Amino acid sequence: MKKVILSVVAIAALGLTSCKNETKKVEDTTKTEVSKEIAMTDLSFGVRGNCGMCKSTIEKAANSVEGVVSANWDVDKKKIDVSFDDTKTDAMAIHKAIAASGYDTEKVIGSEEAYKDLPGCCQYDHEMMMNQSGEMKSDTH
């Protein structure tokens, strides 16, 4: 009978010890998530394009940059909204990735070679204005 009681006490002690370690792991995870939120940056800038296929290509290019969490290009406003981790990338890297796919941004002219490979409906006017607020603005490239 003593062996049974000692066995039950030993199992209970092991169970309490393992529960204590699991609680500590949850606290560490919470601290990591808080620090990730602090590093997020939201950015909006103009990108030339025409249609839904452009939207897909532009967003795919932006999302291919490490650290980009989301990208949404507005066809009517010719504007992209990007959220990214600024400890992993910066705004210029996103501009360059979009330009490499053939699209002009406010800061970088699109790759002419990639532009020629775009479908006909996606070959936009290089003088097209990029609009961020609903008002037309001039852009010099």
Image (cartoon, grey):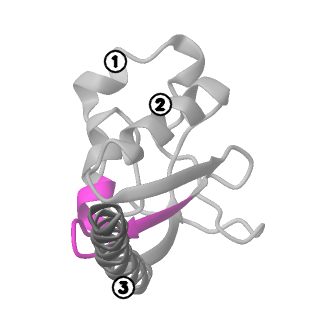
* Point 62% across, 52% down: residue: 78
- Identify whether 14 is placed above or below 48: below
Residue designated by label 2 = 57
The residue tagged 3 is 31
Query: Do the numbered discs 3 and 2 sit on residues whose CB atoms are within 8 Å?
Result: no
Q: Where is residue 54 shown, x and y percent of the image?
A: 55, 30
Name the image quarter holding residue 60: top left
Q: Earlier in the sequence, mark 1 or mark 2?
A: 2
Going by the numbered disc 2, the residue's amino acid type is Thr
- What SS does tag 1 mark? helix
Residue 47: image tag: none
Which amino acid, mark 3? Lys
- Secondary structure of the residue carrying tag 3 is helix
Residue at 69% x, 43% y: name it. 75
On-image quarter of the C terminus:
bottom left
Tag 2 secondary structure: helix
| Segment tinted magenta in the rendering | 81-95
In the visual, does 49 lie left or right of 105?
Answer: right
Binning the other alpha carbons within 10 Å of mark 3 as few (below 14), some (14 to 19) or many (20 upward) gives few
| CA–CA distance in space, label 3 to label 2 | 36 Å
Residue 66 magenta-drawn? no
According to the picture, the residue beneath numbered tag 1 turns out to be 116
Which image quadrant for residue 18? Answer: bottom left
For the point 33% across and 33% down, which residue is it? Answer: 101
- Name the residue nearer the viewer: 72 or 109: 72
